[in-house]
Amino acid sequence: MSGQIRSEWPLYEVFIRGKRGLNHVHVGSVHAADGQMALRHARDVYTRRNEGVSIWVVPSTEIIASSPGEKDPLFAPSGDKAYRHPTFYEIPDNVPHM
Amino acid sequence: MSSAVAEPQLEAEFEAIVGHKDRIEPRDWMPEAYRKTLIRQVAQHAHSEIIGMQPEGNWIGRAPSLRRKAILLAKVQDEAGHGLYLYSAAETLGTSRNELTELLIAGKQKYSSIFNYPTLSYTDVGTIGWLVDGAAICNQVPLCRTSFGPYGRAMIRICKEESFHQRQGFELLMTMMRGTQEQRDMVQESVNRFWWPALMMFGPPDDASPNTEQSMAWGIKTHTNDELRQKFVDMSVPQAEALGVTFPDPELKWNAERGHYDFGTPDWDEFWDVVKGNGPCNAQRLAHRKRAWDEGAWVREAALAFAAKESKENHA
């Protein structure tokens, strides 16, 4: 980051559970002095219309990410394994419930 | 980011993603010019939301009823939220919120010229909701499919909320149009002031918009300024008829051949003058933003100091 000229509140990534039964989903980020403040800011910024029943905030620096931009070999192992998908197997049309 | 892959190959991959109308994500390789263009556009958009709080915030304390006050408060709070979604998107490009705010205050980054016009009466709250937010929606809906993922996702969130903004404005004006003759005159007067500046929100005409072609090739923009302006005029005329007001343009009339409304030319000299900083409220808007930023400095510093102290005590 080029902008840390003077001390800026750290960045937190925000994840929201939209309703019971759903996963938390990343929605954006907020700046805050600490985690509790990040939660409050996330509530004000991302849930003004009942968009959430639960919020997670994580310091952005704590996210460990794969690198999608550089033809990452990380995903190569699943590329050639078509037999992991049900459509790989041919079953006659007259076989029910399959 | 270190990479063993050669730049021409990275560029080809970038072009392929954009060509398929797929999305570029923050950690993808991107041409420096693409990154710069996006930072400029997203920052300008974010600044517009934040500066845009001022003209309407001006009327919160004088809203005519508790209902109207609650609506206006919620609307201005949304503008703050929109600014923050967009700053958040801009930060994924490697800039920081402090940096952007300081560039704005130093006059090195712009915001939409519409917010340099004053709000002279409470009626303007309605007109801004209807026309200014209406124009913003026209601009923003296509941006939901822009090529940079975080920008598009911010736009989706914003568009959902803008609809409330436009409807509350239109309803406010409708209420006034059902009132006294004096109130109807106030609505017409306000619409007269905002119509042309609203048309200017789409930016200069296509032949004077040097960035459009590249932005469209990159999938950042999907429509030209003039296309969007025409769409806005076509949408707004029947709304004005329903409301019972007219637009201050003698050339405005339906063209059956084109299937669109013809309309006059905005005063582009005025537009450029406002962009250059000479609009009625440019100095006031920036001075207000600077004051809020400067006067809030001790709060930002105190919160950091408190967090540091707490963290130390917890680890002691």
Image: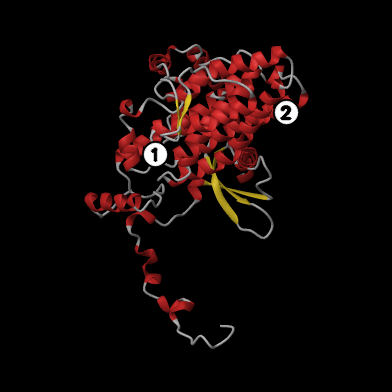
Q: Amino acid at mark 2?
A: Ala
Q: Amino acid at mark 1?
A: Lys
Q: Identify the secondary structure beneath mark 1.
A: loop
Task: State which quadrant residue B123 falls in.
Answer: top right
Q: Please report the residue visible at 53 percent of the width from the left and 38 percent of the height from the top.
A: B85
Label of residue A14 in the image: none
The quadrant of the rendering that contains the C terminus of chain B is top right
In the rendered image, the vertical position of residue B114 relative to residue B315, given as above or below: above
Assess disc 1: are there few (<14), some (14-19) or many (≥20) residues with their C-alpha within 10 Å of its C-alpha. many
Label of residue B221 in the image: 1
Is B35 positioned to the left or the right of A28 in the image?
A: left
In the rendered image, the vertical position of residue A26 relative to residue B261, given as above or below: below
Name the spot of residue A17 as percent of width and height, x first.
64, 53
Name the spot of residue B147 as percent of width and height, x first.
40, 45
In the rendered image, is residue A3 in sight? no
In the rendered image, the vertical position of residue A84 relative to residue B48, given as above or below: below
Q: Determine the chain carrying the residue at label 2.
A: B
In the rendered image, is residue A79 in sight? yes
Can you tell which of label 1 and label 2 is closer to the viewer? 1
Assess disc 2: are there few (<14), some (14-19) or many (≥20) residues with their C-alpha within 10 Å of its C-alpha. few
Name the spot of residue B313 as percent of width and height, x first.
63, 41
Is B180 positioned to the left or the right of A64 in the image?
A: right
For disc 2, the marked residue is B70
Q: Determine the chain carrying the residue at label 1.
A: B
Residue extending furthest toward the front: B256
Residue extending furthest toward the right: B66
Along the line of sight, the residue nearer the viewer: B59 or B234: B234
How many marks on residues?
Answer: 2
In the rendered image, the vertical position of residue B93 relative to residue B197, given as above or below: below
Q: How far separated are the C-alphas under marks 1 and 2?
A: 35 Å
Q: Identify the secondary structure beneath mark 2.
A: helix
Along the line of sight, the residue nearer the viewer: B293 or B150: B150
